[in-house]
Every structure is written in structure tokens, then in C-alpha cells.
Amino acid sequence: MPVKWVLHWQPNQGSTVSSQILNEATQCVESINGVKEGRWKATLNYYKPLLRDQTNQAEFPRDFLGISLADQPNKYYFIIRSQRIVVEADSSIQLIMERLQSYKSKVALYFEGFQYQLGDFRLRVGKVVPTHSENVRGIVMEVEYLPISSMEKSRKVMEEFLEIWHEALSKRSLPGKFVNIDLNFGEFGLGDNYTPQHTAVRYALVMAHMIATVQAVRG
């Protein structure tokens, strides 16, 4: 599977995320000859246990994330951050969980936007919105380098591409920047060869950083 980085928009102190910034980012992709391929969508759910018997509390994770990815429509990924666990399941697991009622989704977020092809790169730029709402809570950008599946071998070319991207975006004088988070995938038992589990972990960490950023800006 091609290596993918997931960046998030970090607003400057005192500024907020808006659909205008998303529009500027997509226009910037097109200005560097990105070819629009269509729409994409991913979802993230934050689950908490429904404990009928409090004595079993220690046996259940306190919370975990469930993620569906645009390029893996038949799969669903669970991340238990506290224990550094990531698990791949069939997408039907969501129906099973609803019926079992052992965990309930407390927060659901959608990632949606446009997908672009740019040479050997595929870019996805989209907004983060809560279910049943149009309020933009964040902006994410996936950068995928199609020829290579080794994270170490692709690092230099990914960094060079992001330099070009940041330079193109800086001309628009936007109040913030796209940030990539360096992760230790070994903590989750993941190696150098890129897999969808790597992407799921990236989204989990991006969400944690975005929530912290929003709280810091508001504070």
C-alpha cells in the first residue's frame, strides 16, 4: 500500500477554522496542477462502554476510536490509544456493535472533500464536521506517494513535496498552516511497510491534536 501522511490545519492563535480556508487549500492544489478525481469521505466514531454492571468496569477499555477510511470501504478500524492497539475488522462490525449495545458512539465526525491526482501523488483535502452539522471543526489533508510503500524510503520525497506545498500555500497568506505529526508506529506493533492500520493510527492522533488545538485557541 502506498505511504500516506495525514496533515491537519493548525490555526494561528486567535483565529478559527473556516470553509474559506478549505476553499483556498483546494484552489491551491489546482494551482499546482492537481487534477480533481472526485469526492472522498471517511468517518470517525468515539466509543464509550455501556456498563450495566459497574463491577466489570476494569475489563472494558474506557474508550476507543472506530474509523472507516475512504480507500478501504469494506473495513473498519479500532484504535485503543491507552493500550496502543489497532485492529482491522469487517465493516459489518458496526451493525454487530449496535445490536450488542456494549459500546455507544458518543461523538461522530465526518471527513469529506475532494481527491486529486498530482503526478505520483494523490491528495485528499477535506473538512471535518460533526454528524448532522455543517460547522467546520477542522481541515485535513492526506498526501499519498503512490510508487513506494516503505515509510523510510519515502520520507525524503514526502518532505520535499510538503516544502513545495507550503511554499505554494504561503502565497495566500492564510492564518495558519498544515501540520504533519511524526509518530512512533512501533508502539502500535506496526512496521516500516505501510498498511491501512497506519492510516487509522494517523487519524486517531490527528483528531487528538485538533481537539487540543481548538481548546488552546479558545483558551
Image: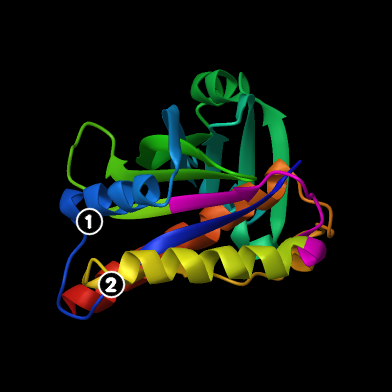
Using the numbered discs, state the Cα–Cα distance from disc 2 to disc 1 in whole angstroms: 9 Å
Q: Is residue 7 left or right of residue 139?
A: right
Dividing the image into 4 quarters, which one contains the N terminus? top right
User: Which mark is first along the chain, 1 or 2?
Assistant: 1
| Residue position for label 1 | 21
| Residue position for label 2 | 176
Residue 51 percent across, percent down from the top left: 50, 42
Contact between labelled residues 1 and 2, with CB atoms less than 8 Å apart: yes
Q: Is residue 120 above or below residue 204?
A: above
Residue shown at the point (21%, 81%) measured from the top left: 13
Q: Is residue 36 above or below residue 33?
A: above
| Frontmost residue, 98 versus 77 | 77
Dividing the image into 4 quarters, which one contains the C terminus? bottom left
| Frontmost residue, 85 versus 28 | 28
| Frontmost residue, 125 versus 54 | 125
Residue 149 percent across, percent down from the top left: 79, 49
Verify whether residue 93 appears in magenta. Answer: no
Q: Secondary structure at mark 1?
A: helix
Which colour assignment does the render follow?
Answer: rainbow
Amino acid bearing label 2: Gly
Verify whether residue 150 appears in magenta. Answer: yes
Amino acid bearing label 1: Ile
Q: Which residues are magenta?
A: 141-153
- Categorize mark 1 by other alpha carbons within 10 Å: few (<14), some (14-19), many (20+): many
